[in-house]
Amino acid sequence: MKRFLLLLIILFLFQSCKKEEGNILKFWAMGVEGENVSKLIPEFEKKYNVKVKVQQIPWTAAHEKLITAYVSETLPDVFQLGNTWIPEFVALNAILPLDSICSVKGFDLNDYFSGILESNRIHGSLYGIPWYVDTRVLFYRSDLLKKAGWKEPPKTWDELYELSKKIKSITGNYAIYFPTNEWVPLIIFALQKKSVLLDKNYTEPAFTDSEFISAFDFLSKFYREKLSPSNITEVTNIYQAFEEGYVAMYITGPWNIAEFKKRISSKAQKLWMTAPLPSPDSNYPGVSLAGGASLVVNRESKNKDLAFKLIEFLSEPEVQIKFYKLVGSLPSKKTAWNDSNFVNDIYLKAFRIQLEKTQSMPKIAEWENIMVSKIQKYIEEVAVGRMSVYEACKKLNEETELLLEKRKYLVEIGSL
Amino acid sequence: MKDKTNFWIVFLFLAPALSAILFFFIVPVISAFLISFTDFDIYTLGDFRRLRFIGFKNYVKLFEDELFYKALLNTFYFVFVGGPLSILVSLSTALLLNSQLVKFKKIFRTIYFLPVVTTIVAVAIVWRYLYHPRFGILNYILSIFGINPIDWLGDPIYAMPAIIILAVWKNFGYNMILFIAGLQNIPSELYEAAELDGASSWFKFKSITLPLLAPTTFFTSIMTMIGYFQLFAEPYVMTQGGPLNSTLSIVLYMYQEGFRWWNMGYSVSIAFVLFVIILIGTLIQFRYEKRIHY
């Protein structure tokens, strides 16, 4: 028995020393994308006569898993990154700049939406190839808009505000839903007002600038006048609230098209529509967020060439259309959008227009922390009326300065 | 001379266990302590030269951090309201289950113990429904008594009580079992003698049950305090620390700083402050223990 155990242990030790085989390309993808992308891979494997090992990672654990993999040097050759995560992995020196490989291979970057592509560019170098895109548009109840006497969705901030007041006076409920635990509406309004958010190579916050304050002011008006719920638990199920007319408008992303189709009952299906975002000036549509996920190459990968081939393959318009049919992720290439699947979809029209007008947020590792733990906090404070907008902006500025202290130091000594 | 060889032999036999403690406990704790004097963060992971020794700055920053005080206050609130409440509920159910009047004791004991062994994630889903402001059963019951609906998890005032109720419900079964064991250890002659003297049941409880249960009470209260100071899972799955950070606990804050934002240095300094707080709490309770032992 003892000898047997010893044998097992020795076997185990040898097993862990075994070298990985050479020609296997490792690819990590998250969530539904990870579940379904493996259906596209066989075609690639046949074409180049290689094996691709796809690993699916749930979104909730993705960030931790990627960082842990980086620390233990087990990152895959190619992986998916939400484009707000790219700056962090650039700071870690974990991913490869792709400019030279793109120009060598003649990879066409002009077919991408410029705002989205820009979110992959850090310090002038391109680090990721957009895989699928997302942005936020206005979802609205067309019947309630009609009741309020509006034939078209609002095109300016003033119209949005007037319409909201009108809807509230008719339904007696709320007009629009700006969740207090979401930074999205405020950041969109700030970008529309041309706020820089962070100044001086992203080392100093600009939250006390007039652009940011006026954007925050605009948002707070909706909470103050009860045009939007100022408490998240009032709307626990947005689909139900939307169907009931508890709220009539909601700014959200493409994943909700499928959800709205699924969760709203069939009799209310004809009552909702999407539209590009209103703008603070006459420049319709207003700017929205450049979201989505990109494919990146591990800097330490031994199969860089093959890794980029996989990216090229997944970027082909036909493959992107297949992928859309599998998971509903919007293609990053404009050519793919000419397919009848997209041209004929009434809900996607707004997204196609909006995608031409997107902008990325500050591209630094700290940004997510600033949004989630600082900006969101002060949105909540203002929404419940504990703080004035000006006070909130001042505090937000102070706290963000502290968060950026390390970055500022690293920039000053030239380490970044 | 002989002692010395003995020492090495003993040491040799202890070595496997000691090395496990050394590598999995002492080394991590010491390195964590060192890290708490640096600004170890995401930039440091990328390039070790970006590490700065910053002395006590993490600790200084901690004591100026509003959010840390908020988390500290929330945790104290939870420990000093939830802790005694939890002990009280455990003791009462233990007394009930130990009384002669109750039938089906084993079934009840199992039922009360079930929440302890159920995973918090599953429990949280159910409790989120119970707490739902519009459709939850809790508000429905309140409405029968004419009380306006309460936004349990969305209102900064009610969020912590909601977490406390959940935690007490989830944890009282464990202490209940310990109390039942303690109660069964009390010799029945004492009660018989008291009955002969005509003692009321309240008097018996006060003068026999409580004093003789003191060691159990002491043990459960220390364990509960230590456990409750490490409040994490309940707010993590129910509220994520919100609304307005009203359910942010120290451990949740530590987790967020460390594993969400990778401010390892800062996060570790929070851990050490929590360690000192728990140590002080335990020492105080040990002081009291000497007085109540029979």
Image (cartoon, rainbow, N blue to C red):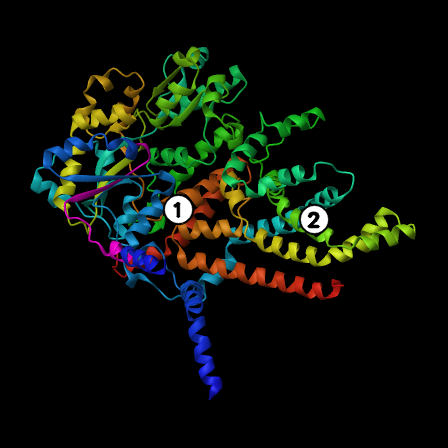
- The answer to whether A223 appears left or right of B157 in the picture is left
> Would you name the residue on which mark 1 appears?
A369
Q: Residues within 10 Å of mark 2 (few under 14, many from 20)?
A: many
Q: Is residue B22 above or below residue B208?
A: below
Residue A324 locus on image (x, y percent): 25, 25
Q: Secondary structure at mark 1?
A: helix
User: Magenta region: which residues?
Assistant: A13-32
Marks 1, 2: nearer the viewer: 2
Residue A40 locus on image (x, y percent): 20, 30
- Please identify the residue farthest to the right as the structure is shown: B197
**Quarter of the C terminus of chain B within the rendering:** bottom right
Residue situated in front as seen by the camera: B55 or B281 = B281
- The answer to whether B81 appears left or right of A286 in the picture is right
Residue situated in front as seen by the camera: B221 or B2 = B2
Could you confirm whether marks 1 and 2 are on the same chain?
A: no
Residue situated in front as seen by the camera: B243 or A312 = A312
The image quadrant of residue A264 is top left
> Would you name the residue on which mark 2 appears?
B180
Residue A167 locus on image (x, y percent): 48, 17
Please give the chain letter of the residue carrying mark 2: B
- In three-dimensional space, the C-alpha distance between marks 1 and 2, rounded to whole angstroms, equals 48 Å
Q: Residues within 10 Å of mark 1 (few under 14, many from 20)?
A: some
Q: Is residue A356 above or below residue A92?
A: above
Is residue A290 shown to the viewer in this render? no
Q: Is residue B225 magenta?
A: no
User: Number of callouts in the render?
Assistant: 2
Please give the chain letter of the residue carrying mark 1: A
Residue B244 locus on image (x, y percent): 53, 42
Q: Indicate the amino acid at tag 1.
A: Asn
